[in-house]
Image (cartoon, rainbow, N blue to C red):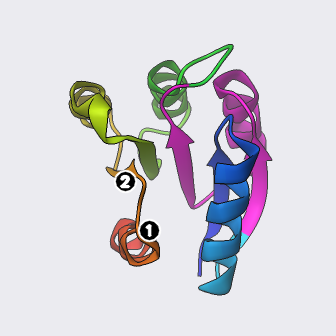
Amino acid sequence: MANILIIDDSKTSRKILRNLLEANGHVIIGEAKDGKEGVLKFKELKPDITTLDITMPVLDGLEALKQMIEIDNKAKIVMVTAASQKSKMVEAIKHGATDYITKPYEPEQVTSMIEKSLK
């Protein structure tokens, strides 16, 4: 079981992730609708794992990732993005992301990625 922060500008995506993760015994300790809000909640809540969308308003996922890694260089951050953004995924991994999931994703992908990140 992990305490998870979900950062995504899509309310629907946040709800799908929340339902999926809670059904697998995880606790959603917070949600944010953009990178700036996400970084503030990350700092405040200190989640075990953060799911982070790349394309968001105010502060995109890559910039939010960089700020979160500065706050905690051992942070477990799983990027969530469209399959068409492979180059951004490579960049995210270089900047410290634990792993990534591409949309649309299968529920099993998400649960196995979270379990893998916890190890």
Residues at circles 2 and 1 in contact by the CB criterion of under 8 Å: yes
Q: Judge by depth and name the residue closer to the eye, 48 or 115.
A: 115
Helix, strand or loop at label 1? It is helix
Name the residue at 68% across, 41% down: 42
Circle 2 crowding by C-alpha within 10 Å: few under 14, some 14–19, many from 20:
many
Indicate the quadrant containing the N terminus: top left, top right, bottom left or bottom right. bottom right
Q: Judge by depth and name the residue closer to the eye, 109 or 117.
A: 109
Q: Is residue 46 visible to the viewer in this orientation of the structure?
A: no
Name the residue at 36% across, 76% down: 112
Q: Residue furthest top?
A: 58
Task: State the image coordinates of residue 30 (x, y, percent, origin top left).
Answer: 78, 53
Q: Is residue 9 visible to the viewer in this orientation of the structure?
A: yes
Task: State the image coordinates of residue 91 (x, y, percent, origin top left).
Answer: 26, 26
Task: State the image coordinates of residue 39 (x, y, percent, origin top left).
Answer: 67, 30
Indicate the quadrant containing the C terminus: top left, top right, bottom left or bottom right. bottom left
Report the amino acid beneath label 2.
Answer: Ile
Was residue 43 drawn as part of the magenta stretch in this picture? yes
Report the amino acid beneath label 1.
Answer: Val
Examine the image and state in which quarter residue 93 appears. top left
Task: State the image coordinates of residue 13 (x, y, percent, origin top left).
Answer: 64, 51
Q: Which residues are magenta?
A: 28-55
Determine which residue is flagged by label 1: 110
Determine which residue is flagged by label 2: 101
Examine the image and state in which quarter residue 21 appears. bottom right
Examine the image and state in which quarter residue 24 appears. bottom right
Question: Relative to residue 76, is residue 56 depicted above or below?
Answer: above
Q: Of the residues under marks 2 and 1, which one precedes in the sequence?
A: 2
Was residue 18 drawn as part of the magenta stretch in this picture? no
